[in-house]
Image (cartoon, rainbow, N blue to C red):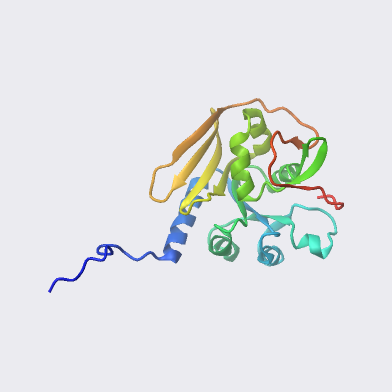
Amino acid sequence: MALPDNGRAGKVASDPRRDRERERDRVLQELHGRGQVYAILDGARDPRVARLAVGSARSWCLYRGNLPAELAEVAPHLFHLRAGHDYADIFFRLGWRNAWGILLATTADQPLLYRHLRTLLRVRSEKKTLVFRYYDPRILRQYLPTCTPMELERFFGPISSLVVEAEEPNQFHLFQRGAAGFEHLRLEKDAAPLQVRAWPAAEAVPQRGPMVLRQEFQVTRAPDEKP
């Protein structure tokens, strides 16, 4: 007796947990060998980020000082991401694909990385000082492709690689520094990396004060509390 072909013959049901673990492993593989791996997570996206920061995770708030509770809860935090730790699994289970933050790799010591990341919090645009939420993947994946080589040099500082979730499922962006400059790769499930763009190397020029944005991105007015 022949059964009707409903188009599902030969297809294997997708396992969301297994798919998530495979994507996590691919992301960490791309950062492997580029230094220590960190995540910058946005407390404004989910209150669980603030709870992670006061738990067992090694983390540092990018806003300094004694913050009011309402500001501390929405502040960005730098996490030292280590495979197998509970907070790393929580990020990939809950935060990845939900714009909780971005991942990076660096060979620099944590204090140097922390100081650099704080310099990126404020930008100048049309003579106004603004808070730049660069740790929001929806913003960073728009901003970095518009940069000049010198702007990338300024943004990256001691960072060797940045991973940003893509808008499309099963894809992510990799921005990395190389001997010849910088490159932007798009990675898709079970596919070889696709180079989107490359930039030549630029000489690092010391810059005082906030970065200057040449285009409008999602930024906010600087609050009274100083990050």
Q: Position of residue 88 (x, y in %)?
A: 57, 61
Q: Residue at x 74, y 57 (%)?
A: 75
Residue 161 shows in the view:
yes
Q: Left or right? Give the position of 103 relative to 116.
A: left
Residue 93 location, quadrant: bottom right
Q: As drawn, is 107 to the left or to the right of 111?
A: left
Picture coordinates of residue 39, whole percent (x, y): 62, 53
Drawn side of residue 7 relative to residue 30, left or right: left
| Residue displayed at 72% across by 27% down | 205
Q: Position of residue 172 (x, y in %)?
A: 50, 48
* Direction left: furthest residue: 1
Between residues 3 and 34, which one lies in front from this camera angle?
3
Rendered location of residue 157, percent (x, y):
67, 37
Q: Residue furthest right?
A: 224
Residue 124 vs 101, above or below: the answer is above
Q: Quadrant of residue 156?
A: top right
Residue at the bottom extreme, as displayed: 1
Does residue 33 appear in this view? no
Foreground of the two, 10 or 48: 10
